[in-house]
Amino acid sequence: MGSRKSRKVTRYRKPLNLNIGIIIYLVILFYIVIYVFMYFSSKHIVAYEVQAGSLTTNNIYKGVALRKETIISSTAHGYVNYFAREGARVAVGDLVYTVDESGKLADYISAGASGENSLSTTDLNELKAEIVGFTSIFDSKNFSSVYDFKYDIEGMVLKLANYNIMESISTLQESGLTGMVREGTALAPGIVVYSVDGYEGMTLEQMDSTRMDKNQYEKIQLLSNTLVSPGEPLYKLSTSEDWSLVIQIDAKREQELIDAEYVQVRFLKNQQMSWGKVSTYTNAQGEIFAQLAFTNSMITFCTDRFVDIELILEDEVGLKVPNSSIVEKEFFLVPKGYITKQKNGDANGVLLETYLEDGTATTEFIEVSLRYETDLEYYLEHERLQIGDYLIMPETGEKYGLSKRGSLIGVYNINKGYADFKQINILYSNDEYSIVQSHTTYGLSVYDYIVLDASTVSEDELIYE
């Protein structure tokens, strides 16, 4: 066999083939990467346009209703049936209930001994009002209120039906029940309510946060055709149109209400308005309560222990700025006599004492920015001014050593393309915005542009759009 010749195989390298499409793609990709890098590595300064406005504050409260209520208890054993409408006004001697010792009155009523019982238009309107009122304040987080509503409707329907039956009560004389049915009449004029909850007779001084908690509230509904024993409650009577609502507040709102003395209230149940006289109380736990006393509308809420209200307070009106724009800065406080004007100019400034190379004392005019003023002093700043520097009074040559400083609340105005501090007077604040006074000498005007987040800039920093 002949010897084989060695063979060396070399791989062929394809030449780099760049076309114009790939070049454009790479340029665009490079540009995007650089732009994204610059975006995340640079400051983001957002402007906010100042507008006139007011703050909507949370003035919604849940109040506990306090009334002059008298509980009427049973003196006999038997089945109770009610014949006065709940929430209706009764006079002395009006029939309110009966206690049936035989237990036969319920059968007599169910048999319809007095004929057909139909609800009048007034009765139906009353039921509709109760339903609409419940749907307007229903909160799914407090589903137990549905059961209270159920008892209210059942009791109302039964009482309306019984009322119609008792319009022909004379027929009882022929029913064989005479002597076995004790009639209960009103001993005083007032509003009839068929429930008890332990709040009867409560005063402002007995209030605490536990009693304000609706989740811990228990109400006993008194229903017709139930067995009662002597001493058990039958109904209660609200004997005065004077009543009050107690709400829990903080110290700031307490002072605001005390200063007002009278406050207008909107009842959320029916959107009606009324004026309440303010009194306050702080219990041993430091909890603050305000009592709003009314002389009308008690009958509307006689069956409600908890009433949702809105306090109608005057809103502060001014310039609306975000709280994130507000910053606090320190400035030098300088007596007004040391502020002078530049020759042939309107710029404000001070005469700063300086020294030449040979040690000779001289003065230099330094233009300063005046940020605020009191009766005696200016708040001012300049990067050249330091604690220990001396200012010269132009008229007398008297010296003043810089040392006193004071802080101001303000925002950074960017109308001129740089961050310029403007002092503000805050009238009112909530969690997000503040209302500041307008038309101040060193403050803001409507439509000014300010920095939305004051922490992103510093004084005199240039703002690039």
Image: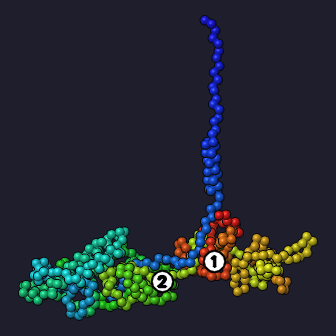
Name the residue at 29% across, 80% down. 129
Q: Does residue 35 appear to the left or right of 188 in the view shown?
A: right
Residue 461's spot in the image, x, y percent?
A: 70, 66
Which one is in front in this view, the residue at disc 1 or the one at disc 2?
1
Residue 65's spot in the image, x, y percent?
A: 36, 83
| Residue 449 picture quarter | bottom right
9 versus 395 height, above or below: above
Q: Secondary structure at mark 2?
A: loop
Q: Is residue 267 visible?
A: yes
Q: How is the image coloured?
A: rainbow
Q: Does residue 280 appear to the left or right of 136 in the view shown?
A: right
Residue 160's spot in the image, x, y percent?
A: 20, 82
- Direction right: furthest residue: 358
Within 10 Å of the Cα at label 2, are there few (<14), some (14-19), or many (20+) other Cα atoms? some
| Residue 217 picture quarter | bottom left
Q: Secondary structure at mark 1?
A: loop
Location of the C terminus (image quadrant): bottom right
Name the residue at 53% across, 78% down. 54
Name the residue at 26% across, 79% down. 127
Proximity of marks 1 and 2: CB atoms separated by less than 8 Å:
no
Name the residue at 33% across, 80% down. 304
Return the residue at label 2.
313
> Could you tell me the amino acid type at mark 1?
Leu
- Front residue of 308/350: it is 350
Within 10 Å of the Cα at label 1, are there few (<14), some (14-19), or many (20+) other Cα atoms? many
Q: What label sits on residue 444 in the rendered view?
A: 1
Cα distance between the residues tagged 1 and 2? 26 Å
> Could you tell me the amino acid type at mark 2?
Leu
**Counting residues from the N terminus, which is met first, the one under dot 1 or under dot 2?**
2
Residue 307's spot in the image, x, y percent?
A: 37, 80
